[in-house]
Image (tube, rainbow, N blue to C red):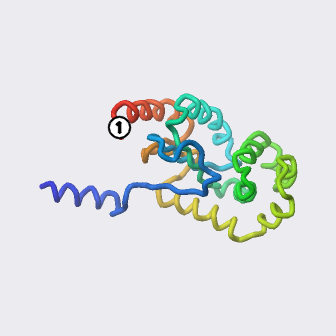
Amino acid sequence: MALAAAVTVLAARGGRAPYEPSAPAYRQKGPANAPIVIVEFSDFQCPACRFAVEPMRRIEALYQGRVHVIFKHFPLRSHPQAKPAAIAAECAGRQGRFWDYYDKLYENQADWAKADGVGFASYAKALGLDEAAFSACLRDPAAAAVVARDVKDGDDHWVVSTPTFFINGRRFSGTRQLTERGIPWIDKILRTGP
């Protein structure tokens, strides 16, 4: 009977192992061994993703030292500037400034989102990045490939909207679910374990 139950669970999961997200170190923050892992699939052109920035910061502050955050790119097809913005953020990340560039993109979303990428180089300059290296990176197919891998990871885990969060493997879609259901889930994990 137990064997049949295990086979059923594996079949329901598609035979997949538990979700073990990865991203370059520059797109992660918090202790790697934290008991809570939050994976955020986000789109820089998505207004809802911009609104999720502050709730995520509050969660990081509330559970300081107990949360590890992993950012994953998920530019939606309906947002034409989202993929170029993701690539630009990757290029900033290669110079150790991903999170600063992340802030610039969300703070100035209304400006660059309607202007065919105008501003990406100026944000790099404002952050003191090596402009030649940044420009070369924007043209580097490897930077686009990193974004494409994140999108595939999101597709493989049935991400259909942004922002989508996975907290220790459990999915929460949007800021409302993150705050109303995600925080109690974090509290439960910290009280009782996963």
Seen as rendered, the residue at the extreme left is 1
Which of the 4 image quadrants contains residue 25? bottom right
Q: Closest to the observer: 43 or 21?
A: 21
Q: Is residue 161 left or right of residue 133?
A: left
Residue depicted at x 35% and y 37%: 193
Q: Is residue 163 left or right of residue 184?
A: right
Residue depicted at x 51% and y 44%: 38
Q: Which residue was labeled with disc 1?
A: 193
Residue depicted at x 77% and y 65%: 137
For the N terminus, the quadrant is bottom left
Residue 186 appears at what percent x and percent y?
A: 44, 34
Q: Is residue 188 left or right of residue 74?
A: left
Q: Is residue 32 above or below residue 7?
A: above
Q: Is residue 34 above or below residue 84?
A: above
For the C terminus, the quadrant is top left
Q: Closest to the observer: 96 or 140?
A: 96
Residue depicted at x 63% and y 64%: 146
Residue 154 appears at what percent x and percent y?
A: 53, 57
Given the image, on which type of amino acid does mark 1 rest? Gly
Residue 31 appears at what percent x and percent y?
A: 53, 43
- Label 1, secondary structure: give it: loop
